[in-house]
Image: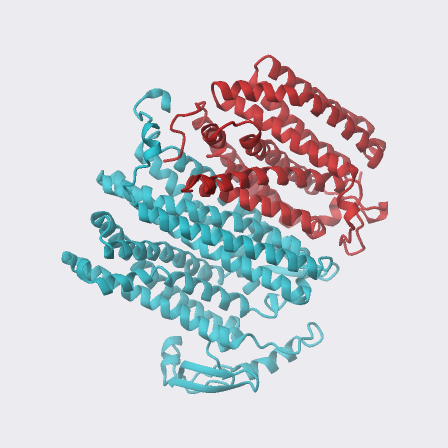
């Protein structure tokens, strides 16, 4: 394989793996902060137990999210040095601010939170968790400011002498309309992830009749947060889709598997596009639904991929001679349906859970609890699908319309080096993923009231002054 | 003075240096503590206590590196691109070290069997060994001059990374980190462990002095630091030796703070020596014409100005809560007491 393919595999692999754990830790972080706040307000011990138990799972997922994040940061320089040179003036700034503003906050207060149980006032302890949650949200904001620029470049100019992109306005970078769709969508999706992992695990425990009261409360809180956030994520996603139709029409067309121009406002529910001959293949269409979704009058024409490809080839002729602008249609089409589909399922299941939680009806509905427990997987499928759409749909650009993936790769890194690092990363990810899942399941099996027999004599008196 | 060098270029060159000083001073003792889990601690209980000394702070210490990387990307994109792609394999191994080390804390804490816990604690040791070693190697091979082409890309051979000076540099940095970690343990624990950390460090200082002398000779023979900047280079080397002596003195007299600050100063000295030596370049080429100037590597003045404003606004708060967090965890630990989180 050539270096470009291998570097792309590496980027895809690390991003997908990184983004399994980042939304989980962001979402669990918020949920745990809410639980601890409830404890401070209601002084009910069960909320403290919830904080501690879900906090453990949060810490585990955070650890994996952090270490894979370092790879991401280094990877730009290591694998994509030409991209870094071209874009450093713009891309580096949000990355540096992310570290300065978010990572220090997150990492310091996570240390304080994990190690000061019973050593500071409950209220102070809850504030630590909120600062962690704010830190991770800020981190998402800044990294997405960088990603938004790649999707929809604003506030820059190309210096003709150096042929590099230069920042025109830092505030302009933050006012990127793409950012204010992408950030809420991603952060709300992350909140949904944390909530539904709680929902899923709590439902599984209820089905096995473990710690009923604890898991009932967890399930309820998770379902409330999950329903709200899943619905909100979809609402923002909808706005994003409307913006996409003009900003990245090829991505939009591929998500709908439209090879030909769409004139009748119908929406394709199922399609098996024929990518060889570039035509729609088998399709199942719902009349008028597209117009309804996009909020147009029914007479709007959406350009198909064949038209767009011709236009784009013409548009970039001379500057970027690219033979084909087609993106991976099948992946985008199905990813979109997985993302939106699982998003809707989560919102519906969340509502149903809340409904059947009244009078505790759900406790005796084994099949419903089983179905609900499967929901723990749903956010991960939706998140991964979302990023596949975002990043694969950007092909062939790293910076949309300006800089190509082929021009971005490091010229001095060899295919063998990349192959070696890909294999080692894969093995590391497999190891970490397996261990993490095993440990989360194990902690869950022990449950919130497990007392380590070895730790019986490790007792600190929290009221003693010297312990502070 | 120097063609094309703007004040903002200089400020950011210094700031990158400061971030690396922060990283080596702070994460330096984390590496040393990681090494002490095998080289100082005798049993599981002691090992837990040693790990606990850095439990709440190692993560924020590592952020200094992430910030240095991000800041380098933003302020000197060419430097970032050249260095990171040019040192592909060493940096990859550093990442592997940081990954296994980074998850080891949580994974060891949630292990069920002794064997499992042992594995993750070994990962902490391995990570703490290879990361400082490779950083020492990268920095000391970098200053000897690398084959950089006209597009700023490094096409280097094995010998450009791995040679006498870079190996000495790697060992030296690892050794100083280890002693620095022992000094931190002396500050953070009570009882037998503290006494043994002191004794072990005393034995290591002669080795450190010998290493510093060899390092100074190699700086003279393998770089043009002393030729180009005789006064400052020799002054920094002298300060490093003085700091090492002070650390030794502190170890003999039971003055932990003095030792800790001094070994930190030796680590800082290496960074300062390198940044002072390469100025006004960021990368030294194997032939003089190939060296990359600070001004050539830099972002636009607009970006640098923006970054400066942001940094001036945020950094005081960061430093304030970082110090506060160290203050909160100032209590010394005792072996065998409930020291785990939760």
Viewport quadrant of the C terminus of chain A: top left
> At 39% across and 64% down in the image, what residue appears?
A236
| Residue A450 x, y percent position in the rendering | 29, 40
Looking at the rendered image, the quarter that the N terminus of chain A falls into is bottom right
Nearer-the-camera pick, B111 or A47: B111
Instruction: Tell me if I can see residue B76 in this picture.
Output: no
At x 65% / y 47%, what residue is drawn? B91
Q: Position of residue B282 (x, y in %)?
A: 74, 43
Q: Is residue A426 above or below residue B340?
A: below
Q: Position of residue B234 (x, y in %)?
A: 79, 26
Q: Quadrant of residue B136?
A: top right
Question: Please, is residue B84 above or below residue B19 in the view?
Answer: below
Q: Colour of chain B?
A: red
Is residue B327 toward the left or the right of residue B36 in the image?
A: left
| Picture quadrant where residue A362 is located | bottom left
The colour scheme is by chain
In this orientation, does residue A239 appear?
A: yes
Q: Is residue B237 above or below residue B305?
A: above
Q: How many marks?
A: 0
Q: Colour of chain A?
A: cyan
Viewer-proximal residue among A276 and A236: A276
In the rendered structure, the answer to whether residue B174 lies left or right of residue B225 reads left
Q: Residue at x 51, y 36 (%)?
A: B58
Which residue is nearer to you in this view: A160 or A409? A409
Left or right: B159, with B131 as reference point: right
Q: Nearer the viewer, residue B53 or A348?
A: B53
Q: Residue furthest top?
A: B253
């Amino acid at each position: 394989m050539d270096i470009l393919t291998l570097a792309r595999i590496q980027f895809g692999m690390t991003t997908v793996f990184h983004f399994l754990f980042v939304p989980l830790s962001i979402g669990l972080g918020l949920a745990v902060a809410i639980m601890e706040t409830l404890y401070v307000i209601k002084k009910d011990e069960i909320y403290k137990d919830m904080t501690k138990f879900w906090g453990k799972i949060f810490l585990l997922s955070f650890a994996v999210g952090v270490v894979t994040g370092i790879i991401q940061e280094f990877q730009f320089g290591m694998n994509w040095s030409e991209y870094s040179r071209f874009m450093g003036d713009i891309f580096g700034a949000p990355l540096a601010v992310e570290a300065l503003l978010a990572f220090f906050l997150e990492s310091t207060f996570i240390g304080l939170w994990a190690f000061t149980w019973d050593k500071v006032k409950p209220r102070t302890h809850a504030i630590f968790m909120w600062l962690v949650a704010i830190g991770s949200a800020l981190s998402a904001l800044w990294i997405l400011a960088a990603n938004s620029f790649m999707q929809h470049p604003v506030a820059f100019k190309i210096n003709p002498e150096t042929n590099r992109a230069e920042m025109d306005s830092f505030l302009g970078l933050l006012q990127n309309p793409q950012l204010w769709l992408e950030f809420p969508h991603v952060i709300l999706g992350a909140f949904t992830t944390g909530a539904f992992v709680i929902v899923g695990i709590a439902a599984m425990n209820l089905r096995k009749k473990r710690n009923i009261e604890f898991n009932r409360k967890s399930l309820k809180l998770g379902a409330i947060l999950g329903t709200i956030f899943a619905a909100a994520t979809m609402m923002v996603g909808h706005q994003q889709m409307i913006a996409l139709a003009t900003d990245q029409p090829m991505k939009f067309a591929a998500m709908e598997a439209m090879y030909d121009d769409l004139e009748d406002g119908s929406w394709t529910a199922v399609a098996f596009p024929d990518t060889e001959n570039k035509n729609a293949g088998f399709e199942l269409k719902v009349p008028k639904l597209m117009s309804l979704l996009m909020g147009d009058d029914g007479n709007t024409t959406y350009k198909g991929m064949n038209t767009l490809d011709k236009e784009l080839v013409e548009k970039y002729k001379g500057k970027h001679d690219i033979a084909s602008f087609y993106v991976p249609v099948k992946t985008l089409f199905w990813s979109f349906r997985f993302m939106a589909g699982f998003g809707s399922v989560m919102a519906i299941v969340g509502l149903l859970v809340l409904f059947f939680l009244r009078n505790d009806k759900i406790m005796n509905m084994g099949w419903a609890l089983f179905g609900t427990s499967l929901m723990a997987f749903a956010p991960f499928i939706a998140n991964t699908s979302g990023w596949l759409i975002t990043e694969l749909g950007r092909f062939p650009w790293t910076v949309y319309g300006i800089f190509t993936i082929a021009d971005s790769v490091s010229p001095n890194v060899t295919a063998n080096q990349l192959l070696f690092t890909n294999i080692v990363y894969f093995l590391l990810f497999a190891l970490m993923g397996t261990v993490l899942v095993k440990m989360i399941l194990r902690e869950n099996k022990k449950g919130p009231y497990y007392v380590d027999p070895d730790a019986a004599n490790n007792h600190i008196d929290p009221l003693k002054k010297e312990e502070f | 003075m120097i063609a094309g060098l703007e004040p903002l270029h200089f400020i950011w060159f210094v700031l990158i240096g400061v971030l690396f000083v922060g990283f080596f001073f702070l994460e330096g003792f984390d590496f040393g503590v990681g090494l002490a889990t095998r080289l100082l601690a005798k049993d599981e209980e002691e090992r837990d206590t040693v790990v606990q000394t850095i439990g709440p702070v190692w993560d924020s210490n590592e952020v200094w590196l992430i910030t240095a990387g991000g800041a380098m990307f933003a302020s000197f994109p060419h430097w970032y691109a050249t260095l990171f792609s040019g040192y592909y394999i060493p940096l990859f191994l550093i990442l592997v070290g940081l990954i296994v080390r980074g998850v080891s804390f949580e994974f060891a804490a949630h292990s069920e069997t002794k064997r499992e816990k042992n594995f993750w604690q070994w990962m902490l040791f391995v990570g703490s060994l290879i990361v400082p070693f490779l950083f020492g190697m990268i920095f000391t091979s970098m200053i000897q001059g690398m084959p950089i082409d006209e597009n700023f890309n490094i096409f280097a051979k094995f010998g450009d990374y791995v040679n006498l000076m870079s190996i000495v540099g790697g060992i030296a940095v690892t050794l100083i980190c280890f002693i620095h970690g022992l000094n931190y343990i002396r500050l953070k624990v009570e009882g037998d462990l503290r006494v043994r950390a002191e004794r072990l460090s005393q034995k290591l200082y002669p080795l450190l002095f010998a290493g510093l002398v060899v390092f100074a000779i190699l700086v003279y023979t393998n770089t043009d630091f002393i030729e180009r900047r005789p006064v400052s280079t020799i002054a920094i080397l002298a300060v490093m030796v003085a700091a090492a002596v002070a650390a030794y003195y502190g170890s003999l007299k039971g003055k932990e703070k003095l030792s800790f600050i001094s070994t930190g100063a030796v680590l800082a000295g290496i960074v300062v020596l390198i940044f002072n030596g390469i100025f006004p370049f960021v990368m030294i080429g194997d032939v003089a014409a190939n060296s990359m100037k600070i001004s050539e590597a830099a972002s636009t003045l607009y970006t640098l100005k923006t970054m400066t404003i942001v940094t001036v606004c945020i950094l005081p708060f960061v430093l304030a809560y970082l110090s506060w967090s160290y203050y909160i965890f100032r209590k010394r630990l005792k072996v065998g007491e409930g020291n785990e989180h939760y």
